[in-house]
């Protein structure tokens, strides 16, 4: 994309799709590109006709469904800024987000309108239900449709999206994402995945999550198709649909693949059209990456790394390098520069054991946090994103994430990476999920606590896990506390909430 190109994101995303080709598939619905363009144009006109203006924040409360996509693209098409509520949003989060974003309107999927109406008062944003939008659209077709006034787009500075993410304090922060951020990051992803209009991705990740939304961006941009899945509660049905609809791609976070490998027939199936798998959203333990490759040997696995503050993606590892660079997040995207810097600001020495923070720069780095200059100044310095992730670099320039800086466990004078302990435990085939945290300890400063979700409670107990760790880890890295649990607390995007685990472990120790 040329640097001087000023293009509205919605126009850019829908430019390549052939008229009769399917853009979205959802249950028994198929929206062609012509259908999608028409619905986007109509809703964009309706939003303007109701008095909303360029830059206004418009919320979307919706599952992975066509209404989400239409609402999102229409908002952006009309020059407004889209704000997405994650699945399971409750009243407290709804009020926090609407107030923080100074939201003018919320477009609400019909199934949620009764709940959201109960949370609203005279100070709340206007609510437009899916049915109301459908009625307005029908009225505009029978009469004269509102004329869409296409606002000029400053792609470098106009916000397409406010993407809320929880910071280290647990208080949601809104990342300011511009049209240009999304366009540049999407082009990079398209390039390394080799996407074409023949690609069709199964989207089980929420579109309110930057990883899930990137699937929509990249596949629409090339004129491909997106299969929208609103729930991963029945993964076997998802696998059936992938085969029936001949999906060429699938994407997931670590918990997604752990479920597929340990709780479904994924490893025994062969998918006739499946070409690639994408994995990001946290580190999938190396043993499970090996399992995944073995499960689908004909399918290319792209291990990736990113942050919401970087639009979506920062690096990837080429599938051909998995055999020799297992555990690496690869190298930066074509337009992204990644540095690993020590505390004094100098780069770590490649091929050494030196560890530093990953610092990123490039056109995918966002403008910071909405109306939060203190946090912006903390993480965005001179146009560079300080990720908070610690890594080392091998002699070939490939990055290996060691852990989040704040997650390291300091026990008896040792700095212990929870990821290293989790990786050792995850090699046990009877472990479905594992998370390791540090908990306060009078003797050691911090003690290691491991939370294990087994495939079946009949298969594992605490002593078995300790014995398993003793065979694979030095003594100071063996968990002092092991808890066999039914599930791990996760956010709406499938990431483990370690702060809650620390609270749980502390509570158990005090009983």
Image (cartoon, rainbow, N blue to C red):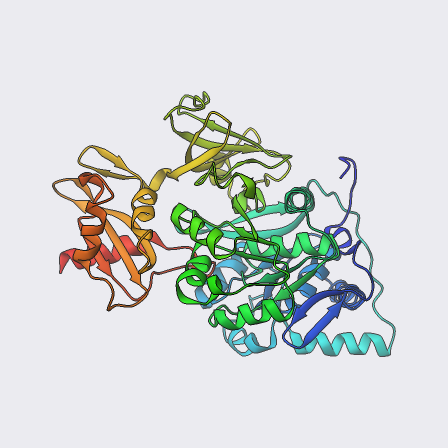
Q: Is residue 46 left or right of residue 466?
A: right
Position of residue 105 measured from the top left corner of the image (x, y, whole percent)? 63, 64
Q: Nearer the viewer, residue 47 or 30?
A: 30
Position of the N terminus, as image quadrant, is top right
Position of residue 336 measured from the top left corner of the image (x, y, whole percent)? 60, 34
Toward the right, the furthest residue is 144
Q: Is residue 203 left or right of residue 265?
A: right
Residue 23 shows in the view: yes
Residue 188, picture quadrant: top right
Position of residue 390 measured from the top left corner of the image (x, y, whole percent)? 40, 35
Q: Is residue 510 left or right of residue 435?
A: left
- Asked if residue 279 is positioned above or below residue 146 in the image, the reply reads above
Q: Count of labels shown?
A: 0
Q: Nearer the viewer, residue 57 or 417?
A: 417
Position of the C terminus, as image quadrant, is bottom left
Residue 230, picture quadrant: bottom right
Residue at the image position 34 percent from the left and 61 percent from the top: 488
- Asked if residue 431 is positioned above or below residue 158 in the image, the reply reads below
Residue at the image position 45 percent from the left and 62 percent from the top: 260
Residue 121 shows in the view: no
Position of residue 304 measured from the top left corner of the image (x, y, whole percent)? 52, 45
Residue at the image position 69 percent from the left and 57 percent from the top: 199
């Amino acid at each position: 994309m040329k640097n001087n190109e000023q293009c509205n994101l919605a126009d850019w995303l829908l430019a390549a799709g052939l008229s009769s080709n399917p853009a979205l598939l959802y249950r028994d619905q198929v929206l062609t590109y012509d259908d999608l363009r028409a619905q986007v144009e109509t809703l964009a006109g309706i939003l303007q006709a109701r008095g909303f203006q360029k830059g206004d924040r418009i919320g979307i409360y919706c599952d992975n469904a066509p209404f989400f996509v239409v609402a999102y693209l229409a908002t952006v098409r009309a020059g407004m800024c889209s704000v997405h509520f994650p699945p399971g949003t409750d009243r407290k989060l709804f009020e926090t987000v609407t107030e923080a974003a100074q939201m003018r309107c919320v477009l609400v999927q019909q199934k949620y309108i009764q709940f959201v109406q109960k949370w609203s008062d005279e100070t709340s944003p206007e609510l437009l239900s899916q049915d109301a939008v459908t009625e307005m659209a029908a009225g505009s077709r029978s009469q004269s449709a509102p004329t869409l006034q296409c606002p000029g787009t400053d792609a470098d500075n106009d916000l397409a999206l406010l993407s809320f993410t929880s910071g280290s304090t647990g208080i949601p922060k809104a990342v300011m994402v511009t049209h240009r951020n999304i366009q540049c990051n999407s082009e990079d992803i398209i390039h390394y995945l080799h996407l074409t209009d023949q690609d069709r991705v199964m989207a089980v990740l929420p579109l309110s999550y930057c990883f899930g939304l990137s699937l929509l961006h990249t596949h629409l941009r090339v004129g491909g198709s997106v299969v929208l899945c609103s729930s991963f509660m029945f993964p076997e049905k998802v696998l059936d649909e992938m085969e029936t609809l001949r999906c060429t791609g699938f994407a997931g976070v670590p918990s997604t693949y752990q479920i597929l490998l340990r709780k479904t027939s994924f490893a025994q199936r062969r998918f006739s059209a499946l070409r690639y798998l994408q994995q990001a959203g946290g580190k999938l333990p190396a043993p499970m990456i090996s399992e995944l490759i073995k499960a689908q040997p004909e399918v290319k696995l792209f291990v990736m790394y990113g942050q919401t503050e970087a639009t979506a993606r920062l690096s990837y590892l080429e599938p051909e390098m998995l055999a020799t660079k297992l555990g690496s997040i690869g190298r930066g995207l074509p337009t992204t520069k990644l540095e690993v810097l020590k505390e004094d600001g100098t780069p770590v020495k490649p091929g050494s054991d030196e560890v530093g923070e990953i610092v990123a720069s490039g056109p995918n780095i966002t403008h910071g946090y909405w109306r939060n200059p203190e946090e912006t100044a903390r993480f965005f310095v001179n146009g560079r994103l300080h990720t908070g992730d610690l890594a080392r670099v091998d002699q070939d320039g490939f990055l290996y994430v060691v852990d989040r800086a704040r997650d390291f466990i300091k026990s008896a004078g040792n700095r212990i990476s929870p990821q290293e302990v989790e990786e050792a435990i995850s090699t046990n085939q009877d472990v479905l999920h594992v998370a390791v945290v540090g908990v306060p300890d009078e003797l050691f400063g911090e003690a290691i606590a491991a939370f294990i979700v087994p495939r079946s409670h009949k298969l594992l107990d605490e002593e078995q896990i300790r014995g398993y760790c003793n065979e694979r880890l030095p003594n100071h890295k063996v968990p002092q506390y092991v808890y066999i649990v039914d599930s791990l607390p996760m956010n709406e995007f499938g990431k483990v909430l370690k702060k809650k685990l620390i609270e749980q472990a502390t509570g158990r120790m005090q009983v």
